[in-house]
């Protein structure tokens, strides 16, 4: 099961740029309530001397497996293509909350996971650029995860603290062991969860209703 195959980013642009000290915004920004794999997502990356808000496709392609929207922190150095991204192509994926599904018998329920103290938090990402047959570039990213969420088989994203954000976005830091150790030393995030509408499973459902808390009975749907 993927980590958050749905997540939200509901910060105002002014708050986002202040929170992450963004120097330049390269793409139009809209608050998003139900972001899904293969969509273009906001990411933060260092370009030269500037910290920039950009966008990339969520999910690696085209050939290295189905589980391409996240990468386990414990296996980052096991595969050469992941190791290359770790050392040279890192980004931050800002997130206001993500969705998980709990399965009980023949029903499942939708829940939103948010950070208790950070309305928008920083998930570590790595990225690559895929070239098609006409040499067009398609940047794409994946989110780094660890462990499972609240008794489900949904992996949890890591959350970068302020010091880790600085190191993660520093292109001069290329030491695999330092980057891996930084990720592995991060404390588990202080998350809380609440039930939401099961309509979040529909990637076309993109309204503020996605993040509204509902009674647990209304979060249920049949499998």
Image: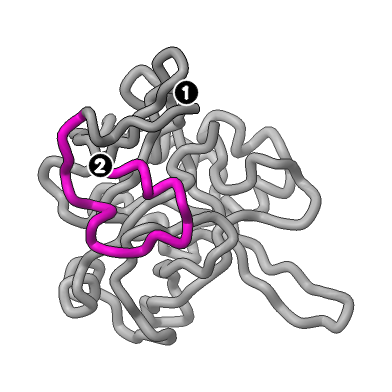
Q: Which residue is mark 2?
A: 196
Residue 60 sits in quarter: bottom right
Extreme residue in the top direction: 105
Residue 98, given in percent of the width and then of the height, sits at: 34, 46
Asked which secondary structure carries label 1, the reply is loop
- Total number of numbered discs in the rendering: 2
Q: Which residue is mark 1?
A: 153
User: Who's the residue at 45% across and 77% down the image?
Assistant: 54
* Lateral position of residue 39 relative to residue 219, left or right: right
Q: Give the CA separation, mark 1 to mark 2.
A: 19 Å
User: Who's the residue at 36% across and 76% down the image?
Assistant: 51
**Residue range (magenta):** 197-216
Residue 70, given in percent of the width and then of the height, sits at: 54, 43
20 to 181, vertically: above or below: below
45 to 59, vertically: above or below: below
- Disc 1 residue crowd, few under 14, some 14–19, many 20+, Cα 10 Å: some
Question: Which comes before the other along the chain, label 1 or label 2?
Answer: 1
User: Who's the residue at 32% across and 57% down the image?
Assistant: 8
Whether residue 147 is visible: yes
Answer whether residue 185 is magenta in the image: no
User: Who's the residue at 56% across and 44% down the image?
Assistant: 176
- Disc 2 residue crowd, few under 14, some 14–19, many 20+, Cα 10 Å: many
In this view, the mark in front (1 or 2)? 2
């Amino acid at each position: 099961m993927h980590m958050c195959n749905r997540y939200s980013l509901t910060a105002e642009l002014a708050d986002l740029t202040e929170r992450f000290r963004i120097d330049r915004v390269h793409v139009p920004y809209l608050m998003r309530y139900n972001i899904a794999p293969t969509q273009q997502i906001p990411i933060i990356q260092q370009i030269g001397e500037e910290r920039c808000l950009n966008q990339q496709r969520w999910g690696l392609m085209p050939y290295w497996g189905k589980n391409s929207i996240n990468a386990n922190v414990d296996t980052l150095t096991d595969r050469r293509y992941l190791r290359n991204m770790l050392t040279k192509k890192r980004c931050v994926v800002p997130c206001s909350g993500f969705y998980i599904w709990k399965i009980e018998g023949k029903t499942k329920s939708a829940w939103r996971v948010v950070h208790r103290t950070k309305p928008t938090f920083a998930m570590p990402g790595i990225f690559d650029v895929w070239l098609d047959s006409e040499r067009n570039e398609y940047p794409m990213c994946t989110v780094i995860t660890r462990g499972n969420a609240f008794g489900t088989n949904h992996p949890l994203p890591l959350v970068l603290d302020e010091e880790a954000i600085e190191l993660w976005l520093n292109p001069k830091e290329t030491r695999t062991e330092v980057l891996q150790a930084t990720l592995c030393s991060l404390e588990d995030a202080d998350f809380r969860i609440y039930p939401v509408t099961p309509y979040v499973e529909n990637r076309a459902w993109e309204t503020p209703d996605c993040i509204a808390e509902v009674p647990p009975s209304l979060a249920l749907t049949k499998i």
